[in-house]
Image (cartoon, coloured by chain):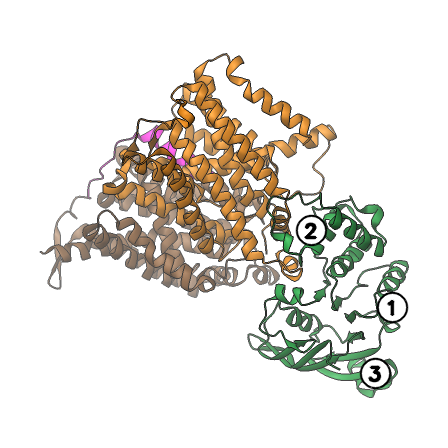
Amino acid sequence: MNLWLILAVNSIALGGLLFLLASGFSLIFGLMRIPNLMHGSFFMLGAYLGVSFLRLGAGFWPAAILAGLALAGTGAVIERLLLRRLTGKPQAQVLLTLGMALIVADLCLMLWGGDPIEVQTPAGLTGVVPVFSVVFPTYRLVVVVIAVAIAVALWLMLERTRLGAMIRAGVDDPQMARVIGIRVSRLFSIVFSLGAGLAGLGGFIGGPILSVYPGLDQDMLPLALIIVILGGTGSLAGALVGSFVIGFLYNFGQALFPDLAYVILFVPLLAVLVIRPQGLLGKLAP
Amino acid sequence: MTPALEVRDLHKVFGGLTVTNGVSLSVAAGERRLLIGPNGAGKTTLFNLITGDLRPTGGRILLFGTDITALAGRRRAHLGLARTYQIITLFPNETLRHNVMLALLGILPRRWNPLRRFDRDPALLAAAETVLDQVGLAHLALRQVRETAYGEQRRVEIALALAQRPRVLLLDEPFAGLSAQERRDVAALIGAIPPAMTVVMIEHDMDAALDLADRITLLDFGLVVVEGTRAEVVADARTRAVYLGG
Amino acid sequence: MKPLAIAAGLAALAALPLWMPGGSYDVNIASQVMIWAVFALGLNVLVGYAGLVSLGQAGLFGFACYVAAWLVAAGTAQWIAAIAAIGFTLVLSAVFAVLALRGTGISFLMITLTLGEIVWGIAQRWVSLTGGDNGISVSTRPAPFGISLDTATPFFYATFAMFVVMLGLVWRFVHSPLGVALRGTRDQPRRMGALGYNVWLIRFLGFLVSGFAAAVAGLFFFYYNEFASPYVLSLTTSAEVVLMVIAGGAATLLGPIVGAALVLGMQDVVSSYVAHWNLMLGAIFVAIILFMPEGLVPGLARLARRPGAAPAAPRPGAFGRTPS
C-alpha cells in the first residue's frame, strides 16, 4: 500500500478519535459558553485509567467503558463542586479548568510515571480488512465505526429526545431557556459529564494508536480548540467535519512538513479568526 | 438656517423586526425637543442610531448639515454630539471627579498621553470642579460612583454629557426613577443648560418634561405620529389614540 | 501608595544582597522575583486595567527569550540582540493584539491562548530553527559598561535597575490619561466611545505596553538562565503569570509583585521537598479563584482598614465583570 493511502487511513482513524474529544468540548462550549481547558486532561486521564483497568484484569472493551464512566463521574463532580460556584464568571471558570488541568497532568505523572505506555490492540482486531481496494487496519476501522455510531447516537439524542431539545435551546439562548423553565444548571452537569465521559472513552480507545504519555493532554487540547472554532461551537456536525479535516491536516502536515505540522493546523484557525471574527466567535463575544 | 440635528427617513431592522420605520426629524439650533411615545416606540433606538451605537439600515443623519451617518460614534462626539443613558452607564469604581475628567478628556488630544499624571492636570481639575458644581455635586467629587445614591448618579450622567461641551445633547429619560424633589432638581439643571446648546430629550414624565420643551415629537411603532408645539401635540386626536389605545 | 513607602521598599530591596542569609542563592531568587514581577506587572495592564485575560502572554515573554538567545548564539552583539528581542516582540505583540482584540471576554482569552500555543508549537517542533526541546543554550551574559553580570550580586543590581525603570513606567502609564482611559474601556466601553475615545486603539496600546513588559522580562529571563527552552512559551508559563496577577490582586500595582514573590517563593520551597510543582500551582490557582478572587493585596488592605469586615461592594477583580 502506498504512503498516501496509509496516511489517509490514519487520518480517518485520528478524525474519529478527535470527534470523541471535540464533540463533548463543543457541546460544553456551546452550552456553558466556556472553553473547557481540562478537556485534554479528561482524554489523558481516561487513557491512564483504562490502562489501570486493563492491568487489574479487565478486558479491553470493559476497560474502555469503565474509563468512560469514571470520567463522566469526574466531570459531574467537577461541574457540581467547582464550576457551579463560579456561575456568571466565565473568565474565572476558564481559569479554574486551567488550574485543574495542571493538577491532573501532575497527578497522572505521579501515578503512572513519565514513560509512555503502549496499549495493546485488542486480540482479534490486529489484522487488516479490505475496504474497497484499500487495506484498512481492523482496529482503526473499529475506532471509526465507534465514532460514527456515537455521532449518530448524539445526533439522535439532540434531535429526538426531550433532553436534546433542552440542550439545543440552551445552546441557542441560555437566557430564553431559563425563561421557559429549563433547569439550565442541571443541563450543565449532564453535558459536562457527557463531554468528560466521551473524552475519557476516546483517550483509552485511542491508546493503541497514540499510546499514552505525559503531555497527551497538551497535545489534544489545542486540537479540540481548533476543531470547535472551525466547526462552530455547539455544532455536532461542525465537530464531525472539523475532526476529520484536522485529522487529515495533522497527518499529512506531519508527513510533508514535519517541522511545521503543528503550525499548519493553526492556519485554518487563524483564517477563521481573521476573516470571520463575528461568524463563529461572535456568538461568544459578550 | 441649517438644523442642528436632522434625521432623514431613518430605518432600522433587527432580524425581521422593524424598529425604526422611516423616521424624519429636524431640530433647530438651540431648540428643546421632547421625544415621547409608548414603550417600544423606538425612542432609544433612535438615540442609538444618532450616536452611532447602532448602524441604520437606511436613511441619513446630519449634524449641523454634515452627514454623520457613516461616522464612528467617537467621531460624532468630536463633532459636538453627547448623550446620557436611560440605564446608568458610569464608571462605578472611579470617583465623580474622575468620571467627569474622563468625559472632559474624551475630546482633548492629551487623552493619548501615556506618561502625564491624569490627576495632576490643573486645567482639567478646575474644569471638572466647574461641571460638578453645575450639577450640584461638587461636595461629592472624591466619592466613588458606586458609593453614591441613585439620584446623584442620574445627575452624574448629565454631568458627563455636559462636560463634553456638546452642541447637541441627547438626554435619555433623565428623570427615570427619581423622587419628586429630585425631579425638580434635575429639571432646574436642564433648564439652566445654555440656550445655544440644542437638547433632545426622551421622557415619560410629562409633568417634569413638558415645561422644558419647545416642541414635541410623538413616536409609535418606529414612526413619527405627531409633531408640533406642546399645545398642538396634546390636542391632537392621534396622541390620544396612541396613549389611550383608542 | 505613599512615595515614602515606595522609596523605603525599594531601598530595602536594593540592600537585599547585603542582608540575605542564603547568600547568592537567595540573591538569585530575588532577581527572578523581580523579572517575573515585571512580566506580571505588564500582564496586569491587560488583566486588571483593561479587563482582558490573556492566556498567551508566555508567547511574548518566551519569544523575546528566543530571539535574544538565537541572535547571541549566532554571534550578534549583546546590545543588538537586546534591541532586536524587544523590537520583534513588540511587533509580535501588535500582531497578537490585532487578532485577539477582535473579541473581548472569553473570545479574547481563547484567541490569546491559541496564539500562545502557535508560538509554543513553532519553538518545540521547528527543531532546525529552535533546537526543539533542547532549546538554545548560550553561556554569556552581557557586560554593560564593562561590568560582568556573571555573579549573583551584579546581576541582581542590573535586574533591580530594570525593575525600577519598568515599575516607574507602568506606574506612570496606569496613572496617565491613557491608563485611566484603559480602565474606562474595562468598565464602560460603550460610554467611552460616546465620550470620543477610540476604544479599540486604547486596548491595542494597552496590549503593547503589556507586550513591552513581557519582552523586557523575557530578555532578563534569558540573561538569568542563559538559555531558552519551549517551557518558557508554554501554557503553564502563561498560567503561572496569570496566577501571579490574580493571587496578588489585579488592578493594583503592588499585587503582581507580591504575586510573583509568592509564587516563586512557594515554588522554591515546594520544589525542595517534592517534585510536583505543577500540582501545587494548580491547587493554589483553584483555591485563589474559588476563595480569594480579589487577590491578596486588596484582601489584606480591606482587612487592615476594617478588621473583620465582610467584603463590601464587589470590586472589579481579574474577572469580576466581563466587558460588554
User: Magenta region: which residues?
Assistant: A99-121
Amino acid on which disc 2 is placed:
Phe
Farthest residue in the bottom direction?
B237
Query: Marks 1/3: CA distance?
Result: 16 Å
Between disc 2 and disc 1, the foreground one is 2
Q: The orange chain is which one?
A: C
Give the image location of residue C201, x and y in percent. 54, 56
Q: Mark 3 points at which residue?
A: B233
Q: Is residue C257 above or below residue A45?
A: above
Q: Which chain is brown?
A: A
Give the image location of residue A228, x and y in percent. 39, 56
**Figure colour of chain B:** green
Name the element at disc 2: loop
Chain at numbered mark 3: B
> Could you say which quadrant of the image residue C138 lies in?
top left
Q: Name the residue under label 1.
A: B208
